[in-house]
Amino acid sequence: MVVVVSVHRWPDAVRWIACGLLLVLPGCAALAPRFPPSMPPAASGVDPGLDAQTRLLESAYRAYVQARYPLASALLQRFVDSNPDSPRLSEARWWLARSYEESGDLPSALSAYRALVAEVPRSTPLAGSYEVYALNRLDAFRRSLGPSSLLERRQIALWLTNADWLTISDVGLWIEQLADAGVTVLIVEAGSIPREMVRPGPIGVYFQTSKVPVVEDRFTVIVPAAHAKGMAVLASLNLHEPGWMTVNPEWGTAMASLTGQAFQPLGHVDVLHPDYQRLVSEVAQDLLRTDIDGLVLEARRAKGFAEEWSPTSRRMFEGQFGFSFDSHDQSVSPDAWRWAGWKTRSYLGFVARLTQQLRQTRPGLLVAVVVHERAVLSPMDALTEYGEDLLETKQRGLHLVVQPEPGMPERSDDQGAAMETVRQRLAPTAGDERQLWLGMALAASDQSSLVTAVRAALSTKVGQAGTHLLLMNGPAIP
């Protein structure tokens, strides 16, 4: 169909066309990519060095817009290496990260974004700056891909206790020092530990929740400060001995004594109790709102896993296997292997369901289970003493954290040899090496010595190769 517009109607037609362009063009502009503005080019002849830098950047940007990303990244990497003091360094780092990202090299892109973020002073970066854009890109990766985007390269995690955080006056400065030392992940205890292990103190957690007591809201300070430096934050929580809550007597466990009479271990809880599992799920959902990148479930501290029982878990066990105990006060030692194995599988099944539930809110959330070195070196003992099963943990798709045994020598060469033994023992079952975190004990007495200890550990062979490294301050827990 042909539309004929008479000459005397041209002014009306022009007005209609203009209105249409006004409606269409803004929409087209919204589809165009928006990048941080580049610095204005230096005036020719004013600073020959800056002129050369500008020409190199222009060549790199020309390659970028032409989709020649390998060339762009090569030119930009040359700029970064040759001009560490350039006023246009942030700009070059931004386009270097973009070039790596566009070419599909995610690990190099993340590294470049983190290098740009590391240049940010402790004060808040200006809105619209390359640093802010880099922070936004890192946050987008973290939210869309989950911690897997943070684990494309080997991670150096530092596990800090609640006592460590009490000595830190400036969290932002402290995290900046740790990032400079090479730490890429912080593991922060989300709740208080059992009172019998430390001097009496408040019971509760360190984030906002209405389900259990709250000591203070610590995560709202730590998480943003760590993310501003490109560091991930994992929250640790103990489900076996929850010192962060008052245990309901109905959830407690009993153990047979030498005289055949049962007693109630203080603070122990039957993790298989449905009501306790429901509470843990609700608390974990509140913890997820702090914007953490993962959850670390701590190892059981007390031995005697195979001897403990509760009416609830015994009914579940008997219902599944048709096995009945002669007396409710006796030990389960005649069938300890089956009992301990069933409890361990049931516990890990709950952890897997909890992981699936949390990932509905945060896809890709990292969930790790901590085990003792004994789980690697003496699996049968670890199963009956602590309820730990490496193969079952790996088959559930969970990350595995191997913590050093108490009494581990503090010399890095001795710890390195022990870690290598653990790594070799795990070789047949480890699978994806990114799921394995090997622990190393530090012996730091204060804030400054901890940074020094981290640098020393990473300068040795222990900190230079292999799986993810977990640095734990103070002696390893039993």
Image (tube, rainbow, N blue to C red):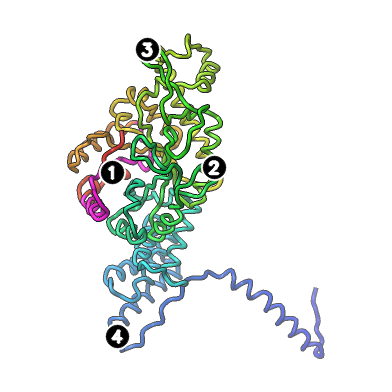
Amino acid type of the residue tagged 2 in the rendering: Lys
Q: CA distance from mark 2 to mark 4?
A: 63 Å
- Residue 217's x, y, as percent? 46, 52
- Residue 38's x, y, as percent? 43, 76
Query: Between residues 285 and 22, which one lies in front from this camera angle?
Result: 285
Looking at the image, which residue is at 48% across and 71% down?
35
Amino acid type of the residue tagged 3 in the rendering: Thr
The C terminus lies in which quarter of the figure? Answer: top left
Q: Secondary structure at mark 4?
A: loop
Q: Which residue is mark 4?
A: 47
Q: Which mark is residue 259?
A: 3
Say whether marks 2 and 4 touch (CB < 8 Å): no
In the picture as drawn, the residue positioned furthest to the top comes out as 326
Reading the chain from its start, which is encountered first: label 3 or label 4?
Answer: 4
Segment tinted magenta in the rendering: 429-456
Say whether marks 2 and 1 touch (CB < 8 Å): no
Reading the chain from its start, which is encountered first: label 1 or label 3?
Answer: 3
Reading the chain from its start, which is encountered first: label 3 or label 2?
Answer: 2
Say whether marks 3 and 2 touch (CB < 8 Å): no
Amino acid type of the residue tagged 1 in the rendering: Gly
Reading the chain from its start, which is encountered first: label 2 or label 4?
Answer: 4
Q: CA distance from mark 1 to mark 3?
A: 49 Å
Q: CA distance from mark 2 to mark 1?
A: 40 Å
- Residue 241's x, y, as percent? 42, 33
Q: Comparing marks 3 and 4, which lies closer to the viewer?
A: 3
